[in-house]
Every structure is written in C-alpha cells, then in structure tokens.
Image: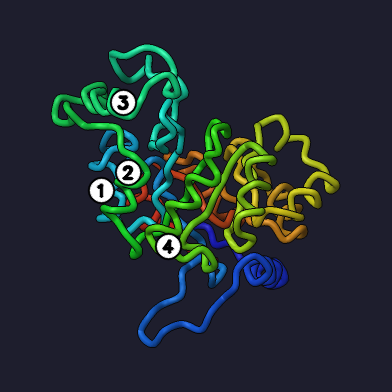
Amino acid sequence: MKEFTMVITMKKKVMLLLLSFMTITHVVSGEEKLKIEKGEFITIAHRGASAYAPEHTMQSYKLAKEMNADYLEIDVQMTKDGVPIAYHDHKLDDKTDWKGEIEQYRLDEIKQIDIGKWFGEDFQGAKILTLEEIFKRFGTDTNYYIELKKTNKGVEKTVYDLLLKYDLNLSNGQVIIQSFSQDSLLRMKSLNVRIPLIKLLEDENALNLTEQKLKEITSYAAGVGVNYKAVTKDFVDLAHNNNLLVHAYTVNQLKVMNEMLELGVDGMFTNKPDVLLELSLSFTY
C-alpha cells in the first residue's frame, strides 16, 4: 500500500478545531477518548452496515456495531404526528409497497411498513425504526452521526430533546449532526453550541468552493461532508487550512477508500464498515 505522510501542521489545525467545538473534559480512569477527540480517522456506518442488511434497520445497525464502526449514521425525518424516524428517502415508493412521503403518515401507519423484503427474503418483516428505538437499543456506548433531512416541524428541538433524554455526551463528539441546510444547523447550534456540526455540500458547491464560503461554514460547523467524487488534495488542504474536517461519502470500493485515505480525509461514510475499518487501521499515515 502506498504510504501517505500527513502534514504536521494539518494535524495541529484539526486538533485546534476539535478543541474549539468540543469541551474536552478529563477522561475518567479507564475510559478512552473518542477517535474524533484525538484527531483520528473515523469509519461511519452509512445507514448501518447497509451492504449486508437493509438500511436503517435494526439488523443493519447491529451488524455495524459488531464490525466496530466508529459511528452509526442515521437519516432522520419526521412522521405526520411529529415522531423522528430513521429513513433516507422522502418517498416510500422505491423500497416499500407504500406510496407517498413519510410526512403524510402517522407513526402507527409507518410501523405497518415492511422495509426489509426489498433487500431479501431473510429480512422480510423488518420495520422502520424511530430514533428513540435506536437510542434505547444501543445506548450511551455508541456514537451517533445524525443527518437532519427535511428540516421542518421543529425537528432540531425534537432530536435535541431525545439526545438529552438518553444522556448522550454532547460535548465530546459522541453525537455529530449533519445537514445540507445551514439554517437547520444554526438552529441546532442555538440549542447547544458544543455539538459538532457538519455542513453537507451539494456536488456543484463542493466543486466550486471558495475561501469565503469555507470561512462562513467555519463560523458554525466543525467540518464538511462531501461526495468522494469531488474530493481532491486541494479541496482537503483548503478545508484543513480553514480548520474544517472533511468527511467523504459514500465510499464502498476498496480502491476509492485507499485514495481517500491518501488524500487525508478525516472520515468516510461506507456501507461496508468492516472493509473500511480494516483498511484504515493498516494504513500508514
């Protein structure tokens, strides 16, 4: 494997960023700091281990945990009656027998949907999860990377209240919030300034990113999330020079994983967390 040497000043910038966005408390005896606190690369299980089980299901998240992924990524949308659930597409049409948008249905209706059979017979009967069900199942020994999808109906406050209810650490990077919406991230920041925020970039915006835009993002976010196809060495250097982390999505090919590591990204979203974790642990920085 080709070796890649991380520039020391870049690592210092990342650590300064982490210190500015998180209140790093003294580590309890025997308790290890999270990778993101130490400025290390993170593996983000994209909708769970979704190459091996239907996305956003309990099976997918359990597999990701068994594979030791650093984060479980959860796309959050709101039901008609205001319950945050884990589902990516705005419409149900592609992966279920139901039609229309998530927000048209109450939770009791959403719970009737089979979200597993499109993936395979072994997963038939899998149900759409609420965010609370995920927190109940995996608790405080899991790291969560939450994307706020449609940002209406007070989703930020609802999600934030659940984070508090389940006693998740909001200052050390156990929870990361991402969104394409700057307004949504700013609303979350108004609730708690310590939660690391990631600004997702549309492909066109990533390809035409300016220093001025990056400085604007730096004023409220800890990093940017970007399609791996738009990631270049210049892009990573520009982001790091502005004290921003770079998390690339969604990387499932071994060759591309290696390329992203060589470019110096700080984390990757993948449907195959087992593959990425093994590669990243053997990578020479």
SS class, disc 3:
helix
Instruction: Give the Cα separation between the discs numbered 1 and 2.
Output: 6 Å
> At 81% from the left edge and 52% from the top edge, which residue is drawn?
215
Which mark lies nearer to you, 1 or 3?
3
Q: Which residue is mark 1?
A: 63
Label 2 crowd bin: few (<14), some (14–19), many (20+), radius 10 Å: many
Q: Which residue is mark 3?
A: 110
Q: Which residue is mark 4?
A: 168
SS class, disc 1:
helix
Q: List x then y, in percent, for residue 241.
A: 76, 59
Q: Are marks 4 and 2 in contact (CB under 8 Å)?
A: no
Question: Between 112 and 235, which is closer to the camera in this rendering?
Answer: 112
Mark identifier at residue 153: none
Q: Amino acid at mark 4?
A: Leu
Instruction: Give the Cα separation between the discs numbered 4 and 3.
Output: 26 Å
Q: List x then y, in percent, for residue 236.
A: 68, 52
Q: Are marks 4 and 3 in contact (CB under 8 Å)?
A: no
In the image, residue 49 sits, relative to residue 55, either above or below, namely: below
Which mark lies nearer to you, 4 or 1?
4
The first of marks 4 and 2 along the sequence is: 2
Q: Are marks 1 and 2 in contact (CB under 8 Å)?
A: yes
Which mark lies nearer to you, 4 or 2?
4
Q: What is the residue that sits farthest to the front in this orientation?
A: 81
Q: Amino acid at mark 3?
A: Ile
SS class, disc 4:
loop
The first of marks 4 and 3 along the sequence is: 3
SS class, disc 2:
loop
> At 30% from the left edge and 32% from the top edge, which residue is drawn?
128
